[in-house]
Amino acid sequence: MQFPQIERRAGLSDHAFIRDHLRQRRPVVVTDAMRDWAALGKWTPGYLKGLLGDMTVCLQGGGFQETRRMRFADYVDLLPRFESGDVPAGQEVPYLRWSDEDGGFTDALFRCVREDWARPSFLPARFYLHPHVLHSDPTTLRHPASGIYVSPKGAVTKLHADSGLTNAVLCQVHGRKQCFLISPDQAPLFPDLKSRTPEPWDSPRLREAYAGARVVETVLEPGDILFIPGCWLHEVYTLSASVSLTYNFAHVTEAARYMPFAVHYVASEAARQLSPPVLRRPVLRLLDGYARLGRRLNLEGF
């Protein structure tokens, strides 16, 4: 069983991206938006190992839970074993993603490779709501959930939607990944996302596990960038030893969708820090009332 392929485009301008994909919340693979990156052909696991091999990294499983820690150099040395299948059956494949608990590894790695990449050419340069910046240069300002992911063949990121209604770009620098995307209106078919276990890549039940949902798919090759609209479910399998760069964002052209979330959730978090404490309760009540009104009016973002 094959699913419809995600649209692939080259020469996509920022205006066309906003019109055809960001506003329409339609995924796309852009095939030439990182053609000028020095990272292409340079960022192999071995190259990154040479930069920060002695740092300790936090490894995760198919979900986002920490499974173990080890030296980055030792992790990279494990990757060929998964490529050749020289691992015990059933062993969970370790995945190096961004993590709050990574001990500064991600920050250090981004500093090392800052000159090797740039904002993807189809993304607008200005007027972002998340992060809250007038002009966006993701190489100097860390965007939400930004990370450089390293994974061996067989690694998987289980089905999920990114938090905060934000969009994501997945930039494939080295190796290949298979991506399955499911639109937000199909989410009720997956009420058990937290406990759901992804099927192994080579399982004949892989596509059957999507429970009759409308799914689109693509294989990312080096140089491809996948745009994942906010609230879209996605599951990603590593087909060969891989290095990817990813980050999240929300743009001013999405204000009607994003601002209710920002006002309610982001402002509520800020209100909890108010001093003196006597101010917190009335402000939180006001924000809760705003959220109830939004839900009653069936506005998105609540």
Image (tube, rainbow, N blue to C red):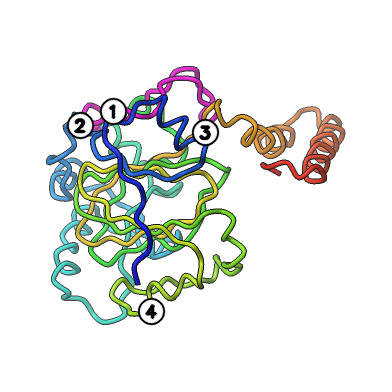
Above or below for 179 versus 288:
below
Q: Along the horizontal axis of the image, is 224 left or right of 268?
A: left
Q: Amino acid at mark 2?
A: Trp
Q: Earlier in the sequence, mark 3 or mark 4?
A: 4
Q: Amino acid at mark 3?
A: Ala
Q: Amino acid at mark 4?
A: Arg
Task: Answer whether labels 3 and 4 touch (C-beta < 8 Å).
Answer: no
> In the image, is residue 126 part of the stretch drawn in magenta?
yes
Q: Which residue is mark 4?
A: 205
Real-space CA distance between mark 1 and mark 2, rounded to the nearest whole angstrom:
7 Å
Q: Earlier in the sequence, mark 1 or mark 2?
A: 2
Element at label 1: loop
Q: Which residue is mark 1?
A: 118
Real-space CA distance between mark 4 and mark 1, rounded to the nearest whole angstrom:
39 Å
Real-space CA distance between mark 2 and mark 3, rounded to the nearest whole angstrom:
23 Å
Q: Which residue is mark 3?
A: 250
Residue at the spot x=34%, y=74% of the render? Answer: 200
Q: Along the horizontal axis of the image, is 186 left or right of 121?
A: right
Element at label 2: loop
Task: Answer whether labels 1 and 2 touch (C-beta < 8 Å).
Answer: yes
Q: Along the horizontal axis of the image, is 135 left or right of 154?
A: right
Q: Which residue is mark 2?
A: 37
Magenta segment boundaries in residue numbering:
112-137
Q: Earlier in the sequence, mark 2 or mark 3?
A: 2
Closer mark to the observer between disc 4 and disc 1: 4
Q: Residues within 10 Å of mark 2 (few under 14, many from 20)?
A: some
Residue 75 place in picture, x, y as percent? 23, 59
